[in-house]
Amino acid sequence: MSEELHDVRLTVNGASHEIRVPARRLLSDALRHDLRLTGTHVGCEHGVCGACTVLVDGEPMRACLMFAVSAVDHEITTVEGLTHADGSLSPVQQAFAECHGLQCGFCTPGFLTTITAGLRDNPQPTHEEARDMIAGNLCRCTGYQNIVKAVERAAELGSEARTSTTGGAS
Amino acid sequence: MTTKLMGQGVQRVEDQRFLRGLGRYVDDVAVEQQVLHAAVLRSPHAHARILDIDVADVLDVEGVHAVYTYDDLTGPMAEPLPLLIPHPALTHGRTQYALAKDEVNYVGEAIAFVVAEDRYVAEDAVARIRVDYEFLPPVVGIAAARAAERLVHDDVPGNVGARLEQEVGDAKAAIARAPHTLSLDLTVERSACMPMEGRGTVARWDPDLHRLQVWTSTQSSTGVRAAVAVKMGLGLGQVDVVTPDVGGGFGVKINHPWPEELLVPMAARALGRTVKFTEDRREHFISSAHERGQVHHIEVGFDDDGRLLGLDVEFWHDHGAFTPYGLIVPIITSTQLLGPYKPQNYRVVFESLYTNTVMVTPYRGAGRPQGCYAMERTMDAIAAYLGKDRTEVRAVNFIQPDEFPYDQGLIFQDGRELEYDSGDYPASLEKIKALVGWDEFPAFQAEMAAQGRRVGIGLACYVEGTGVGPYEGAHVHIETSGKVKVATGLTTQGQGHATVFAQLVADELGCPFEDVEVVTGDTRRMPYAVGTFASRAAVMSGSAIHLAAKRAKEKVLKIAAEALEADEKDLQIVDGVVSVKGSPGTSIDLGTVSVLSNPLRYAFDEASKAATQFSVGDPGKPPVPEDEEPGLEGKDFYSPERATFASGMHAVIVETDPDTAEITILKYAVVHDCGKLINPMIVEGQIHGGVAQGVGGALYERMAYDESGQLLNASFMDFLMPYVTEVPDGIDVDHLETASPLNPLGIKGAGEAGVIPSAAVFAAAIEDAEGIPITAMPISPSELFTLRQEHSS
């Protein structure tokens, strides 16, 4: 009894990877164990906790609810891909560091990807919108207080970055 | 002069790897290699005899390497798992086998262990194992356990694992004489730690070195190491346990060894391959541990001021199917129930009961939330009976600041006297009243009532014994690069130890914070350690690290004084450079001092030339002075006489919907006294997390077992852990810093505090809003709705 394997080309953080996997291989497992991108974490494997959230064509998706074979032809971004090319932290990552938005760090990658997409769509969220942005992810350590602050701080950092790159004066 | 880092909200160093996705958790270990993956067949029945296990179909599955059942275990592996904390009162302690022998006692108990090419295949194989069971009637819940019409273990009469009584004075007589008496019955249901990362273990046997390397997501690496060595018949020196990054613990990972922590190393050695087990979420619900389930009966006698004259508490603790962690949880309830108060006469007795459910190990707070709930609800009941303000009744019962040290006359969880070291409860009460707006609340309540809205306020006080022994140790090594490598043996699961411990070292040594690197939970670096529990890491390892850094500093000054031809007393260390005070030109950096500390025959680089035999040393003296060792290191241990007692008070204002009975949090306030703060940012983060878990425990989370012992809500779909939408939008925190006299830094533990008063404080606030006694927690809107109907009819 041997399983049929499929050749799959995954585009992750701008790089193309060829893997050979069974149809049932979850995207989360393919990222972690085949591509060795272990920044994406698995907290429940039933799509509730959000720790495995990655961006698929820019949209937050649960990697544990998607098969690797379904990810062909899509651009996937994981937490590793949020860091700038020069190794510096993105505004969302930087805000988490400044605001103590993480403790054990296990749920953090899912929050970072979710908020990155959220702030792209809504760069200046109100306080309520900032809370709403993270309302689909579970964290057992922080009580969310500092994660909400980090969303608001990331919005500030993003807006500062846009101002400086466009040369605009405030 | 460098600013002291103690007390500063220094940003965490560990965040840099976590934020980049470069953390290394146990399931990330060995990901570059072709490792084998394990899956476990778990009992689908709560109570059954195993008649036969048929694994014949399993080895046909392509990719399966091995399958183990109890019959494959030999020697110590075939004996029951250790009873970690024996106690004379635990007359009927029982632990499970690594794989079930003859009988299963809870849904989730491990029966067979399969190792395969990947987890998918291993699970396929598990599904092919056939087990014949003879069903036995299960015992579920405290009422059934007490009724004892059925037994969990045939040889444990009455399902009673332990009965423990402690008494100070004569409680019954005092209650009989008291002008007023009340009795209360209070229950708390089960919940669980539920870290985002479950359990996991990886092991690799090195046939060249005859050494076993184990990575495991634990709160006690030295404990796992000792257990693995004993069970596998290896010398302690043949086993290394490394705790990688851990995705939360909250107590559940202090239990050890889990069956998989033994089976993975066993299989790795037998198969000559690296083997990995990673628990999935359903497994975590049904095969790790729960806590909190208790029923309490309280009799209290008091005077006209509400002063306690006698307190008599009986409670029943549901410890599940086995007792590997002994009686720690109910002992803590029975002692910490007293909180900041001094009843004149106190008797407490508990029974720890078997049920056919997942076993119990400490969950953040570890019995204190139940004790606080029992005591604080009693205070509220006394105030209601006397028509007094709830804060006044508490205030007359407080231990006063000038009464410390205060001996409660009981034996605590560490086998030592329950003696509080310091505290200032009246000051905390003033702070919490101001923070929540206690005195202004009645006007607000009336104003809301006029609008048809129901609001209520609750307050609860607690004392938490933190930093229990026996000890922790630390090793500080200043390398020739000037970098400082620090090791302590307890583990880290999100507390920011690498940051706070580096703060302490930088302060003591006078080196840059950035030059300090802290390693925790690696038995190769510090083989003597206990573990991370009981809010003890900062107190125990913090103190040990402070002392070890002091020793390293003494050595620095001695060597530098000789090199600079100066008096030790005239030296200072600033930014990693030792210099003579007042003449900054006369200086030597820590790296060079490290070079000089280790007399060499062989140079290996430019710096080390300075320490070779023709360069340094007085030819008339031995190169390493008597009573000295080569190398610039400091090692020390901290072992306090007893725990240090932190304290705090929480208050909450809730609104209950008159139609739907939905409970909304309007304000949450915390006053917290954990002695001197090392890093206030991290302490506040701990409080926030505790409060959120407390909200979950008070309003949402429960383990829904049915009468046959099936856990009906074993997923995140059904077990309602709070999202951001369930926690308060803002938590007001104020600190008191009453120093502990027991350790050099004056610190007390902070990790668990945030969760302790929640059941008490929410029950009080809902009762205040509704005018209905709240005696069972957690409480859901539908339960509150039902209570309303009962009380209106």
Image (cartoon, rainbow, N blue to C red):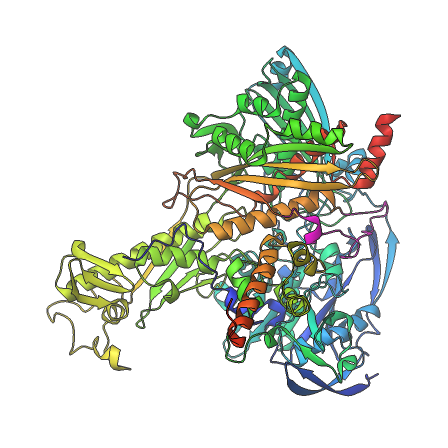
Task: Say how many tags the image has.
Answer: 0
Examine the residues drawn in magenta and state their main secondary structure: loop
Residue depicted at x 47% and y 55%: B529
Q: Position of residue B381 (x, y in %)?
A: 68, 23
The percent position of residue B710, horizontal first and vertical second, equals 83, 51
B720 in the magenta segment: yes
- Magenta stretch, residue numbers: B703-729
Instruction: Classify residue B130 as left or right of residue B763.
Output: right
Write down the quadrant of residue B281 in the picture: bottom right
Q: Nearer the viewer, residue A26 or B233?
A: A26
Give whichever of B370, B761 is nearer the camera.
B761
Specify whether B135 is left or right of B255: right
Which of the 4 image quarters holds residue B396?
top right
Query: Considering the image in quadrants, where does the N terminus of chain B appear?
Result: bottom left
Q: Quadrant of the C terminus of chain B?
A: top right
Instruction: Establish if B549 lies above or below B241.
Output: above
Lateral position of residue B202 relative to residue B696, left or right: left
Q: Which residue is painted at 64% across and 74% down in the image?
A: A78
- Across and down, in percent, residue B406 comes to 46, 28
Q: Quadrant of residue B137?
A: top right
Q: Is residue B64 above or below residue A49?
A: below
User: Which residue is outermost to the front?
Assistant: A169
Is B344 inside the magenta-drawn segment?
A: no
Q: Position of residue B777 (x, y in %)?
A: 73, 38
Residue sitting at the far left: B620
- The answer to whether residue B728 is seen in the rendering is yes
Residue B349 appears in the figure: no
Residue at horizontal 57%, vertical 74%?
A: B205
**Depth order, front residue of B520/B792:** B792
